[in-house]
Image (tube, grey):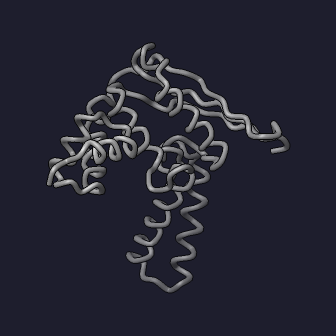
Amino acid sequence: MSITSQMVKELRDKTNAGMMDCKKALSETGGDMEKAIDLLRQKGLAVAQKRAGRATSEGTIQTYIHAGGKLGVMVEVGCETDFVAKTDSFLDFAKDIAMHIAAVNPVSLTREEVPADLVERERAIYTQQALDSGKPANIAEKIVNGKMDKFYADVCLMEQKFVKNPDVSIQDLLNEIVASLGENISVKRFARFQVGA
């Protein structure tokens, strides 16, 4: 199948990947758009893993104030160089993260940062539910682990589904921006303020 420039443009619009990367992905997948998207996401993950150890001492602090001024978010997003920190795609990513935090209200960045008392409370509730349903201990433990994974996906920023595109997680979004900009990027910290909360 011949790869048209329209196909390359469509894939580029969907993934923000480079034109040559899009053309190569379409060639490798025989023009299958969905498979090409998956291939580019896998490559993005590989690039992100290679760059994960690099220091992110540059970056930006972005804010999002919801209409009416009753809700605000401040987020720090780091990158390796000042050059990347000034690019539109990096700044747009940081703004999207701030807006997502305002909408979804995560508890922490990662699983490791969820307060231990909250984890223990949730685990105790799920364990009691599983035991009350009469499940054997080994099955109950698997049920609890599955529910804990869902709990983490709901409260950890990096595991949450992106509010503008529920098909991707925040980690997927981060991997895509790392792949497109060619630098390690990290969401370092955030604060969410709500009047009366």
Q: Is residue 151 shown left or right of residue 179? A: right
x then y, percent, for residue 173: 43, 42
Write the residue at 46% across / 60% down.
149
x then y, percent, for residue 95: 58, 33
Q: Going by the picture, which residue comes out furthest to the bottom?
A: 134
Q: Is residue 105 shown left or right of residue 90? A: right
- Tell me: residue 154, above or below residue 22: below
Between 52 and 100, which is closer to the camera in this rendering? 100
Location of the C terminus by quadrant is top right
Between 34 and 154, which is closer to the camera in this rendering? 34
Write the residue at 50% across / 34% down.
93
Write the residue at 39% across / 42% down.
13
Q: Is residue 188 shown left or right of residue 67? A: left
Location of the N terminus by quadrant is bottom left
Q: Quadrant of residue 18?
A: top left
x then y, percent, for residue 23: 22, 41
